[in-house]
Image: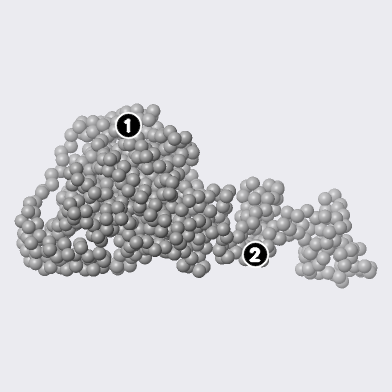
């Protein structure tokens, strides 16, 4: 019934296998990948025909984790997997980025790659394996995919590069780098590092690329045996149309691309667009999509030729020149830290908020529940590019936010050094090239303004590439148009000593390590210039926190006292919070953290906690409340949790006939500890008078 074709290799001392022919046979391509007890299903399906009105390649990549894969039931009310988690979104992007450039520009059929984790052994990370499975599914699908590609993860412990490190090894690693590409070239890099040099990062990329070549060979062998017919693409000759469009608008476009102001430039290009749409409105030979495709091709030719032949960029800068930078801090009076970073026509307002462990983010995953004390959220409203549109958190926001998070994370102090939960929000208010790197710069300044003792200021820069044959130009601090019309988006963030994050996306079939080396060197020069501009606004962390930042005090209590402080069902700790207005947190080691911006509020909570753990002392006077009346005396609650008996003979200096003649329930009284009787506290109101 099944015609199963399977390939298997030993990769990094582990058995890696891919097979097809048994599962999901209705898909164009389907792969079951196994490594250890981690099992991944990846499918690729494309529409039989393209929509003639589609002016882009409609590729959708979805990565999903099923909780049964780790023997778990999802949390929440519905108890089923719902919208994609942040991790699933990031891995979807990771798969998408190396495969998208390997489809021909003429292919416009709607295509979906769906990759699902069916089994997870908590040892073999599905992140890299999903890229491999997706590549294999596309390679055997018959779609015009110019792969295969593969990926690997690289760590670095004690200056030794490690292939596909475990989660435990990554805790000790100064590098976490994912590299993907073809047999001949690198297509994508994603990394977080602890200030590694340009040479070390390049070596890690080379190591990762060399390591996944056996995986590509395995996929290629499987493809040969599957022998699926390739989908044919009709390629239309647009030579005549291109000449007509060039004659009509080339001079106007050259004027437009010599205009430095983005708004003016966009307006002039729009005029050309409207002119052509009107001219070809009733043309039977070409659709609007075909006309616009050739207009974009002409725009690309003009910009790229200017850069390659004349070394002239759109805004007149030199190839390695960074745009003008303006930096400010303290622009938001109530934020714990804030900064405004403006580079050319790209701008970010970045705010830092500090809080207690109570506000740490709880993240549910196949590995279990985790907590994160550092969050970085990136927002890209439509007005930042002069457009009208919906607002929300999409893949772009999540991806750019995570890139900035990686750039900043290694420079943060440890929880022991700085016990606060940290949240950064970057609001992009203008965008014309690399708002994610503006977020990195703004975040660094905002953290320093908030008084977070970061190790070093961090800056980021986006690099571009224009390549035709062997001729190429590397561009520093690219504009949006240079990104759109170029061949590479290469983002580098770091301190003045080393790299903390590197992300690279290639839009052509790959670049050489010689180009990467030049781009890294040029990026370092640009990064140092940006750091210098930032230092004029702020160069080191403020020594004091904002007056609006909740100040923390810690009290070490005996572990036996934890239950008393928390109380039944958390009642006692809730009462402290509600009565004092402070935030109170206690860990399993008996460390009580009390935080509030107002000192009086903080001291009130501290007093309440101390009263709970304080032991009554003979001869000491305490404030208390009468909680129970008996014939023989009154029980008084003091020190928050302690009850003691005031015998009727100790109520007053004169003889008392009836307890209620002196006190009643709810009365606030002063009592003196006069002794203990079999663990019970003996109190006296008479002695306290």
Q: Where is residue 343 in the image (x, y as percent from the top left)?
A: 35, 61
- Gap in Å between the C-alphas at discs 1 and 2? 62 Å
Q: Tell me the element at label 2.
A: helix
Q: Quadrant of the N terminus?
A: top left
Residue highlighted by disc 1? 17
Which residue does the image show at 62% across and 47% down from the upper left? 588
Q: Can the viewer see residue 21?
A: no
- Above or below for 174 versus 83: above
- Above or below for 464 versus 142: below
**Quadrant hosting residue 640:** bottom right
**Quadrant hosting residue 179:** top left
- Above or below for 651 versus 33: below
Q: Can the viewer see residue 596?
A: yes
Image mark for residue 599: 2
- Total count of labels: 2
In terms of depth relative to the viewer, which is nearer, 577 or 408?
408
Which residue does the image show at 79% across and 69% down from the upper left? 667
**Quadrant hosting residue 512:** top left
For the residues bearing labels 1 and 2, Cβ distance under 8 angstroms: no
Which residue does the image show at 32% across and 32% down from the upper left? 17
Mark 1, Cα crowd under 10 Å, few <14 / some 14-19 / many 20+, is: many
Q: Position of residue 215 (x, y in %)?
A: 30, 33
Q: Tell me the element at label 1.
A: strand
> Outermost residue toward the right?
655
């Amino acid at each position: 019934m099944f015609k199963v074709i399977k390939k298997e290799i030993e990769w990094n001392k582990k058995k890696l296998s891919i097979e097809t022919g048994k599962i999901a046979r209705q898909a164009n391509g389907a792969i079951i990948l196994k490594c250890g007890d981690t099992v991944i299903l990846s499918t690729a399906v494309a529409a039989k025909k393209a929509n003639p009105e589609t002016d882009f390649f409609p590729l959708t990549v979805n990565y999903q984790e099923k909780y049964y894969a780790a023997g778990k039931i999802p949390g929440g009310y519905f108890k089923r997997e719902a919208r994609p988690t942040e991790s699933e979104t990031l891995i979807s992007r990771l798969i998408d980025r190396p495969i998208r450039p390997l489809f021909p520009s003429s292919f416009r059929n709607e295509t979906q790659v769906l990759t699902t984790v069916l089994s997870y052994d908590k040892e073999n990370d599905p992140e890299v394996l999903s890229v491999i499975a997706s590549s294999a599914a596309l390679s055997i699908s018959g779609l015009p995919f110019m792969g295969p590609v593969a990926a690997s993860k690289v760590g670095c412990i004690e200056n030794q590069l490690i292939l596909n490190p475990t989660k435990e090894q990554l805790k000790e690693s100064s590098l976490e780098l994912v590299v993907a590409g073809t047999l001949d070239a690198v297509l994508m890099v994603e990394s977080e590092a602890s200030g590694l040099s340009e040479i070390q990062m390049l070596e890690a990329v080379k190591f990762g690329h060399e390591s996944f070549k056996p995986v590509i060979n395995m996929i290629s062998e499987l493809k040969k045996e599957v022998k699926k017919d390739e989908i044919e693409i009709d390629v239309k000759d647009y030579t005549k149309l291109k000449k007509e469009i060039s004659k009509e608008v080339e001079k106007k476009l050259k004027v437009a691309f010599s205009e430095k102001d983005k708004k003016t430039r966009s307006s002039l290009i729009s005029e050309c667009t409207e002119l052509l749409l009107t001219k070809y409105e009733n043309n039977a030979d070409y659709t609007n999509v075909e006309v616009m495709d050739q207009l974009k091709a002409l725009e690309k030719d003009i910009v790229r030729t200017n850069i390659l032949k004349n070394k002239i960029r759109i805004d007149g800068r030199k190839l390695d020149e960074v745009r003008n930078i303006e930096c400010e801090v303290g622009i938001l009076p109530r934020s714990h830290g804030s900064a405004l970073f403006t580079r050319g026509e790209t701008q970010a307002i970045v705010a830092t908020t500090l809080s207690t462990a109570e506000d740490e983010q709880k993240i549910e995953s196949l590995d279990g529940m985790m907590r994160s004390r550092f969050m970085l959220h990136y927002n890209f409203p439509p007005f930042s590019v002069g457009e009208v549109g919906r607002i929300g958190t999409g893949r772009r926001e999540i991806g750019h936010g995570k890139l900035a998070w990686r750039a900043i994370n290694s420079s943060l102090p440890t929880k022991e050094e700085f016990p606060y939960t940290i949240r950064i929000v970057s609001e992009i208010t203008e965008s014309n090239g690399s708002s994610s790197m503006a977020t990195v710069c703004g975040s660094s300044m905002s953290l320093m303004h908030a008084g977070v003792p970061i190790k070093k200021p961090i800056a980021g820069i986006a690099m571009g590439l224009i390549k035709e044959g062997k001729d190429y130009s590397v561009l520093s601090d690219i504009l949006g148009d240079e990104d759109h019309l170029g061949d590479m988006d290469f983002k580098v963030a770091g301190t003045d000593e080393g790299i903390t994050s590197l992300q690279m996306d290639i839009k052509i079939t790959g670049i050489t390590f010689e180009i990467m080396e030049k781009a890294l060197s040029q990026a370092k020069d640009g990064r140092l210039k940006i750091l210098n501009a930032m230092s004029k606004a702020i160069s080191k962390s403020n020594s004091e926190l904002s007056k609006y930042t909740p100040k923390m005090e810690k009290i070490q209590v005996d572990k036996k006292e934890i239950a008393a402080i928390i109380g039944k069902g958390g009642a006692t700790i809730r009462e402290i919070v509600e009565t004092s207005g402070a935030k109170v947190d206690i860990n399993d080691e008996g460390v009580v953290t009390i935080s509030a911006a107002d000192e009086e509020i903080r001291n009130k909570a501290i007093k309440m906690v101390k009263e709970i753990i304080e032991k009554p002392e003979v001869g000491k006077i305490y404030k208390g409340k009468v909680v129970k009346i008996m014939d023989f005396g009154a029980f008084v609650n003091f020190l928050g949790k302690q009850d003691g008996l005031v015998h009727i003979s100790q109520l007053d200096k004169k003889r008392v006939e009836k307890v209620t003649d002196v006190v009643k329930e709810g009365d606030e009284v002063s009592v003196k500890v006069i002794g203990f009787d079999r663990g019970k506290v003996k109190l006296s109101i008479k002695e306290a008078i």
